[in-house]
Image (tube, grey):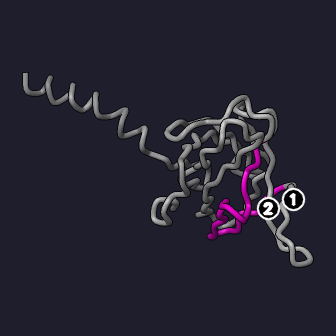
Amino acid sequence: MLLKKTLLIAALLSPSLFANAHEYKVGELHIAHPWSREMPPVAPTAAAYFVVYNKGAEADRLLSVSTPHAGKAELHEHMHADGVMKMQQVENVTIPAGGEVKFEPMGYHVMMFNLKQQAKDGERFPLTLTFENAGKVDVEVAVQKDAPADEHAH
């Protein structure tokens, strides 16, 4: 009887533990805490952020992103040009061997256009990342009111 109760409690707790797990792995790449900031319902776009760690001996490249949450998703970066901060699309992002690339506000990010609807704080939506060597990985992007604290972003 005690074993049945223990198993029942473990089964009930397991989904909540997995729901909080926010790390993904594909090949030698580790993707940590995909997140997006909650936007006003009328905002036409949103951005997604995460960190990609490359534990391998060779560089890899993030080639594309997609999500059913938006009509189009692109890789973007912010950069200074002539004293002005600009955002532009990039074809791909290299993840150096033994290194990391942060997708964060004012840096690399996933830009999503033609949203079906803005996600709210606490919701999640799927995002597929396609890497040159490691292949595809599906992640869940957590929508938050504010950017995560540094220790939670890694």
Q: Secondary structure at mark 1?
A: strand
Q: Looking at the image, is 100 positioned above or below residue 31? A: below
Measured in 3D between alpha carbons, the distance from the residue under mark 1 to the one under mark 2, in whole angstroms, is 6 Å
Left or right? Give the position of 55 relative to 129.
left
Q: Nearer the viewer, residue 123 or 51?
A: 123
Mark closest to the chain's N terminus, 1 or 2 = 2
Label placed on residue 88: 1
> Residue at the spot x=60%, y=62% of the render?
53
Magenta run includes residue 16: no
> Residue at the spot x=54%, y=54% of the render?
146
- What's the magenta region? 92-112
Q: Nearer the viewer, residue 58 or 15?
A: 15
Q: Secondary structure at mark 2?
A: strand
Quadrant of residue 4 within the rendered picture: top left
Which x, y percent locates residue 125?
60, 35
Which x, y percent locates residue 126?
63, 36
Q: Looking at the image, is 19 positioned above or below residue 64? A: above
Q: Which amino acid, by three-letter code, is at mark 1?
A: Gln
Label placed on residue 77: 2
Left or right? Give the position of 127 relative to 82.
left
Location of the N terminus by quadrant is top left
Quadrant of residue 136 within the rendered picture: top right
Which x, y percent locates residue 72?
81, 37
Q: Residue furthest bottom?
A: 83
Label placed on residue 11: none
Q: Which amino acid, by three-letter code, is at mark 2?
A: Glu
Quadrant of residue 140 within the rendered picture: top right
